[in-house]
Amino acid sequence: MFSALRCTQCRQIFRPRAVDAVVESPTGRVCRSCDPVSGATSRTIRATDQLHGDTQELIRGLKYRNRRGAVAELADQLVQSIIDDPESPQYEIVTWAPTSSMRQRQRGYDQSELLARAVATRLGIKCRRLLYRDRSAPQTGRNREQRLHGPIFRARPMRRPYRVLVIDDVVTTGSTLRAAAHALDLAGAAEVCLLAVAATPRDRSTNSRVA
């Protein structure tokens, strides 16, 4: 018999089933939703393109060369993918998966926030910061195994269950966006949809799909 445990990622109490072993990760004992291998891997992450060509150059310019003019074109790309998707729900709030505070200080802005606000403006709905990131290291520059253990997010309880669209620039393993979705689930979101501008071509295990 297993006793109730507190997940070291999302901090929620969970009780492992008798048929499950307690999941161990480099960050401690985690619930199945926070486990990078067994948890939440069925949640689909949509991407508008592969990370190559013009899309890659626009993202690089935005992230590393302060070319904020790329936001408009990338936001148009995101919105068009939403319009073209017959299964797209009526979102009520747009938010973003925040980058690390170190990256934001270096760049002077969070590129995902800029994209989320531009997407919300085009869709005519509100954009709110719903997610708060801990002091974990940024994903940029980490190898695949390290990326599988994504950042930890917190989200304040929602006043009512909203349908939330989470925006990010690039999806590699999907751990960042799934961690964001898990936090929003715990906060009471009715539905969480994950959308990135681009997916890395080597990604074969995140259940992401190019719109």
Image: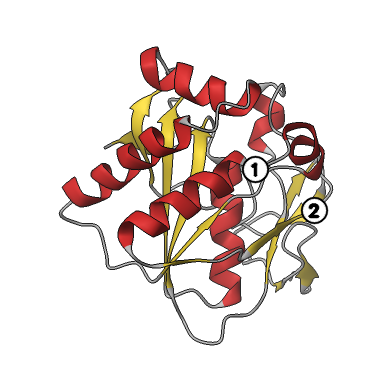
Regarding residue 207, the answer to whether it shows in the image is no
Judged by depth in the image, the label closer to the viewer, 2 or 1, is 1
Q: Percent position (x, y) of residue 27?
A: 82, 46
Q: Residue 178 in the image: state x and y as whole percent.
A: 54, 50
Residue 160 coordinates in the image, percent (x, y): 49, 86
169 lies above or below 179: above
Of the pair 16 and 92, the residue shown nearer to us: 92
What colour scheme governs how the chains and residues are painted in the rendered image of this protein? secondary structure
In the rendered view, does 175 fall on the left or right side of 4?
left
- Residue occupying the point 42% across, 75% down: 190
How far apart, in angstroms, are the residues tagged by discs 2 and 1?
15 Å
Q: Amino acid at mark 2?
A: Asp
Q: Residue at x 64, y 54 (%)?
A: 34
- In the shown orientation, is residue 114 left or right of residue 198? right
User: Measuring 62% from the left and 67% from the top, which residue is drawn there?
Assistant: 17
- Label annotation for residue 59: none
Q: Looking at the image, which residue is at 31% across and 37% down?
A: 77
How many numbered marks appear? 2
Secondary structure type for disc 1: loop
* Amino acid beneath label 1: Asp
Verify CB contact (< 8 Å) between mark 2 and mark 1: no
Instruction: Check disc 2 and report the residue beneath it.
Output: 134
Instruction: Classify 10 Å Cα crowding around label 2: few (below 14), some (14-19), many (20 and above).
Output: few
Report whether residue 142 is seen. Answer: yes
Quadrant assignment, res 104: top right
Q: Position of residue 71 (x, y in %)?
A: 46, 37
The residue that label 1 is drawn on is 110
Is tag 2's residue or tag 1's residue first in the polypeptide sequence?
1
Label 2's element?
loop
Q: Is residue 187 shown above or below 39?
A: below
